[in-house]
Image (cartoon, grey):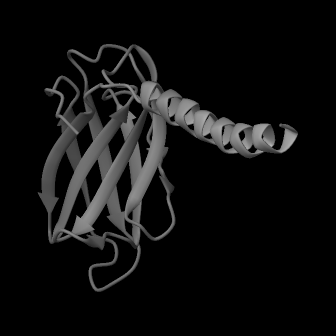
Amino acid sequence: MKRSLSVCFIPCFKRLFFITVFVGLLSACPNEQSVILGPQQWQELGFRVDARPSPLRVGMNEFIVVASHGKYKPGVGLVVMLRVGENEEWRQAIQDGYTGVYRRAVKVDDPATQSLSVHVRRVKGDNEGDETVLLFPLNQKRAAQ
């Protein structure tokens, strides 16, 4: 009797544990839509901005700038700075490896009326020193993921 109990109990317990963890993970994933700003083009680079939390709120919000050549080549060799509001200071975004992803949290006072300014400057390559400012209105519609 002992042997049959342990043979059934352990595999059943493992299955139950994995099912519980899987259901918990599924319920932890919200069915929200992400705020995606852009896309915009500068020279051969495309820029898109993901914002978190979604929808944007008053206070600190994280902006993730994705720079790419074409569809799959990361845009690297850049210094990216962000600000929301004309009178605010520029905040340099942190480069996330060599993936073309730059992120920074910036304070937002009114998501309905403000725009995100993204200052991009090349620090490597043929066009070193080129720079631009891209404007992304914060009141864009959310996109399904």
Q: Quadrant of the N terminus?
A: top right
Task: Please tell me which residue is depicted at 60% across the width and 33% down the height of the picture.
Answer: 16
Q: Nearer the viewer, residue 135 or 76?
A: 76
Q: Name the quadrant containing residue 90.
A: top left
Q: Is residue 139 left or right of residue 88?
A: left
Residue at the (17%, 34%) spot, across then down: 143
Q: Residue furthest right?
A: 2
- Which sits in the foreground, 116 or 6? 6
Residue at horizontal 40%, vertical 13%? 58
Q: Quadrant of the C terminus?
A: top left
Q: Residue furthest bottom?
A: 126
Please, is residue 97 above or below residue 36 in the view? below
Give residue 14's position: percent from left, percent from top: 66, 41
The quadrant where residue 61 appears:
top left
| Residue 10 horizontal side relative to residue 53, left or right | right
Q: Nearer the viewer, residue 28 or 16?
A: 16
Give left or right: position of 35 versus 124.
left
Answer with the quarter of the image where residue 12 lies: top right
Residue 102: x %, y % from top left: 42, 54
**13 to the left or right of 139:** right
Taking the spot 33% from the left edge, 21% from the top edge, the residue there is 56
